[in-house]
Amino acid sequence: MKNYLVISFLVGALFFTSCEKYLDVMPKTQIPEKEQFSTEQGFKDALTGVYISAKTLDTYGKELAYGTIESLISSWDVTTNTADQQLGLFNYGDDRVINRFNRIFERQYSTIAHANAILQNLETNKSVLITSGLYELIKAECLAMRAYIHFDLMRLYGPVPEDPTKGNKLAYVTNFDREINAHISYDAFKMKVLADIKEAAELIKAVDPLLTYSMAEVRSPITSGTGSGFRPTDTFFAYRNMRMNYYAIRALEARANLWYGNKEAAYVAAKEVVEAKNADGSQKFKLATGTEYSATNYILTTEHLLGLYAFDMAKSYTGNFGNATYKKGTSATTIRNQLYGNTGTDFRESSLWNIITLANGSTNNVIRKYWVTADNVTNATDYKQMPLLRTSEMYLILAETAPFAEGVNYLKTFRTARNISNIANPQDYPSLVLEVIKEYRKEFYAEGQAFYAYKRLNAPKAQVLFVPAAAVVNYLLPMPTVETIN
């Protein structure tokens, strides 16, 4: 089974006895593993496949963006006796909820398996990678994606950080074979996450064009004619906004260290991202402002340190938000007052939501974050990206990890970008953290990050906005049954 990679590749290497279909750039073709990794193009296609696998509906294409992960914190109005209602009640024993988490778990480890297959073959077939820097680039991206997905598995299924003795132990899978992978301690898992991130950053720093060129330049490479800018000899080094790049890896390092309580390390990593400069001295990663919202760039791609390209985002929006499957309220009142505090100025409050009327006459308040035009667009105006890491998160991490006065300034800078000036500044550190968590809820609505923020701080029920009165907040998910029965 291991000899065929593209469609049927080894998922039994993880925990399972079944084979998972793998969506690659050639979805109707089986390619033997030996042939797949016999050329540079084979390695490139395989790496592209890792990102395609990561954006399936079971993970970052839906469930870990605006689906299951948001239902856990009751971001949407739900129908009685549905999986989403039970998620909001933290009823992890419901069969439909169990199935949701099983699928997420399987797909995440499935994507890890493919990254591991590439890493294994990089060492045995390194000689076929003759393009300068390609080996380092591919290895770094695979290591970083492996760390990213493992870390999210721990954030979702693992312990609350303040008490790592309670909760599941998970396996950190680095092999691509049938070897059984032992569940390891929280600390051992942490060390593996951070080690993969560290190695990835070291490998990619010397070859990533994003350190030399701006994000706009690498997003729109020059492939013919004259003109100045990024002119790669191999376009595989372009479009760094949709692949693990050096700054995305540093952002992941900041996120992970914050989770693990290493605030100084989180501060250093996040600050490097925020203070990065282009060759002309301009800021490499800026916070979005009203300009983006006016241009209907509701997903704020200008802030994306890493986003997954979603060619079918327009269709997905229609099928999930355009029909009000995911909505919050029948008017703007709930969101405006409870989420944003009725500031009257916040760009998110005024631009990010829309009242739609369905054929049955019902009015529904839906988020526009994933609305995009289906028309042909240029690279600069193609907003079809699912965000995984954003500049705004780095400012919130800095607000929480910097010395108090500096942290308040980072929060003020962030709020100014969102057109908020009429909220008093926090006067002590606990108040600052509470304000930061409120901003996580506002900023990452329908992106999946707010649940993790609540869990990281073990937030009590009173702090979890929109939680039902009947709910008993429980951040400790059971181990998926697909893992325990196979």
Image (cartoon, helix red, strand yellow):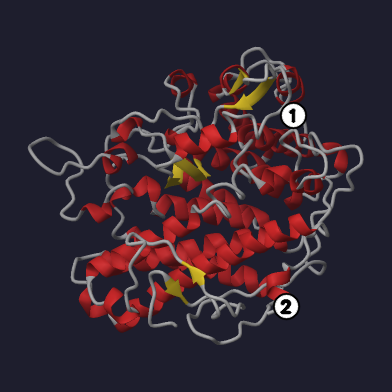
Label 1 residue SS: loop
Q: Is residue 175 above or below residue 218?
A: below
Q: Give the camera-side residue of 21 and 377.
A: 21
Q: Is residue 303 visible?
A: no
Percent position of residue 481, x then y: 73, 70
Task: State the image quarter where residue 384 is shown.
Answer: top left
Q: CA distance from mark 2 to mark 1?
A: 49 Å
Report the disc number at residue 426: 1
Measuring 41% from the left and 28% from the top, which residue is drawn there? 373
Q: Is residue 295 visible?
A: yes
Report the disc number at residue 59: none
Residue at which label 2 appears = 485
In this image, 428 relative to 27: left or right?
right
Identify which amino acid the numbered label 1 is placed on: Pro
Identify which amino acid the numbered label 2 is placed on: Ile
In this image, 49 relative to 135: left or right?
right
Measuring 66% from the left and 12% from the top, which residue is drawn there? 344
In this image, 457 relative to 380: left or right?
right
In this image, 254 relative to 204: left or right?
right
Q: Is residue 56 above or below residue 415?
A: below
